Structure formats: C-alpha cells, structure tokens
Amino acid sequence: MKIRKTTVVLAVLDVLGAAAASLAATTVVMNRRGAWGGASLMGRLIDDPSVQEQLKLTPDQITRLHTIRDQARDSIREMRATSIRARADLRATLLDTKASRQDIEKSAAAVREATSALSQEVTRRLLDARDVLSVDQREELLSIVQERAGARRGLWRRPPGFRRGNGPMLEDGAADDTTTE
C-alpha cells in the first residue's frame, strides 16, 4: 500500500513538473506580433508612400530600407520556423512519459535559444533600419507609429453611451434602467 501511495505522489509531481515546464517554455515565446511584429510594422511603414513623403525619405534611404526588410524577412522566417520546431519538440518531449528530466531540460533550452536568437535578429534588423534614418526622421516615425497605434487601440473601445450592466445611457448621462419584457 505504501508503494502505491509513493508511486501516485511521484506521478502527480511528475505531471505538475511537466505542466510547469510547458508553461515556462510557452511563456518565453511572445505572441506573434510581440516577438516579430516590429519588423513587419517597419516593412509596412516603409512601403507606404504617405509615410515616405512624411519622413522625407530619399530614394537611397528607401532602397536601403527595402534591402534591410527583405533580408530580415528571409532570416526571421527561418528563425521563426526553428523556434516553432523547437516548441513542438518540447511539447512532444513533455508528452513522452519515458522522457528523462535531461531530455526535457534540453528541449526547453532549445526553445529558449531559438526564441532568444529570433529576438536578437529582430532587434538587429530594426537597429539597422534605424541607422538609415536621421534623428528628425526617427522622431517623425515615432509620432506616426504612436498615432497609428492609438487609432488601432480605439477600435477596441466601447461605443459612446455604453454602460456595463445598466443598459445604454440617456442623453443627459443618466442610465436607462427601463427594461421591456
């Protein structure tokens, strides 16, 4: 009887450890836009003629930015695939009941390394693009990004007059608590 209890306790601890390792491994990887969204944002911005005009980009700057973007797209795509494979391998290792602790730790380390390499590549490419721009252009680009981010955030706001739980608001700002049944 004592052996059964010990086996059950060890099995539960093993499952909890695997779940914790899985959670830790997946939280290291940022969401798609967070991890590499900056590079795709830069690509969309430099392709926008209104942004090019607003930043007063020279044809040489546009060419250099396009080159950086194209190189980044290829290298980031490969690194993203490596990261996805590493996460899949970790999941498979965690689901393998016969996997050793060392195997799980090795898989988790591969996920961390792939994620770190991807993050470093995105940062390096963004800094390469930053070096092409003058200080004034960087400041203007920052205001464009903030403006567009603010507009995007506005899409998730509640409509005017919406009040949670109390129904729509009346013109004077009071809640309309009348219900029709």
Image: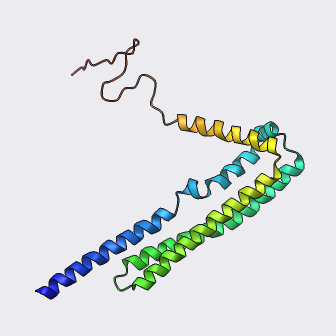
Left or right, 2 with respect to 126, comes to left
Residue at image point 48% right, 75% down: 108
Tell me how many marks there are: 0
* Residue 165 falls in image quadrant: top left
Residue at image point 54% right, 69% down: 84
Q: Toward the viewer: 105 or 86?
A: 105
Left or right, 135 with respect to 114, comes to right
Residue at image point 35% right, 15% down: 174
Q: Toward the viewer: 85 or 100?
A: 100
Residue that sits furthest to the left in the current view:
1
Q: Quadrant of the C terminus?
A: top left
Image coords of residue 25 (percent x, y): 46, 68
Q: Tell me if residue 45 comes above or below residue 3 in the rendering.
A: above
* Residue 119 falls in image quadrant: bottom right
Image coords of residue 131 (percent x, y): 80, 54
Left or right, 126 with respect to 89, comes to right
Q: Tell me if residue 147 comes above or below residue 87 in the rendering.
A: above
* Residue 58 falls in image quadrant: top right
